[in-house]
């Protein structure tokens, strides 16, 4: 039986991000699961593309958000880094 959080957001699995083009502010959503804890995380600014290649812009993002990225799957910065940067 799928979790109600997954069903409500139209997701198929935990830790699998999905684009949300109709959301007014955030570009992606994911239901993060670590251990027995689940958390709905919205991340990424709508309309802003990341930089998958190593550029000054991507380096700046990683420098600014390094501590939050290191927190792991339960942080929005981790998912933004993984999907957009």
Image: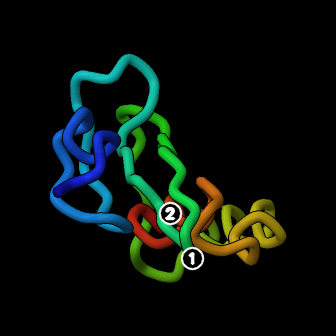
- Mark 1: few/some/many CA within 10 Å (<14, 14-19, 20+): few
Choose between 56 and 64: the one closer to the eye.
64
Where does the N terminus fall, quadrant-wise? bottom left
Residue 79: image tag: 2
| Residue 17 falls in image quadrant | bottom left
Q: Left or right of 74: which side holds 70?
A: right
Choose between 72 and 12: the one closer to the eye.
12
Choose between 33 and 60: the one closer to the eye.
33
Q: Left or right of 82: which side holds 22?
A: left
Residue visible at 59% across and 54% down in the picture? 76
- Mark 2: few/some/many CA within 10 Å (<14, 14-19, 20+): many
Q: Earlier in the sequence, mark 2 or mark 1?
A: 1
The colour scheme used to paint the residues is rainbow
Q: Residue furthest top?
A: 24
The residue at which mark 1 appears reads as 35
Q: Is residue 10 above or below residue 12?
A: above
Residue visible at 42% across and 79% down in the picture? 53
Residue 17: image tag: none
Q: Left or right of 66: which side holds 15?
A: left
Residue 78 position within the rendered picture, expressed as x and y whole percent measured from the top left: 59, 67
Determine the secondary structure under disc 1: loop
Q: Left or right of 52: which side holds 72?
A: right
Task: Say which of marks 2 and 1 sits in front.
Answer: 1
| Residue 2 falls in image quadrant | bottom left
Residue visible at 48% across and 37% down in the picture? 45
Residue 84 position within the rendered picture, expressed as x and y whole percent measured from the top left: 42, 62
Choose between 42 and 60: the one closer to the eye.
42
């Amino acid at each position: 039986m799928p979790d109600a959080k997954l069903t409500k957001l139209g997701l198929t699995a935990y830790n699998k991000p999905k684009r949300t083009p109709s959301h007014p502010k955030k570009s992606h959503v994911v239901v993060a699961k670590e251990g027995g804890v689940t958390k709905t995380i919205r991340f990424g600014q709508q309309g802003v593309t990341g930089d998958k290649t190593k550029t000054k812009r991507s380096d700046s993002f990683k420098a600014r958000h390094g501590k939050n990225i290191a927190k792991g799957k339960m942080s929005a910065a981790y998912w933004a880094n993984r999907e957009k940067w």
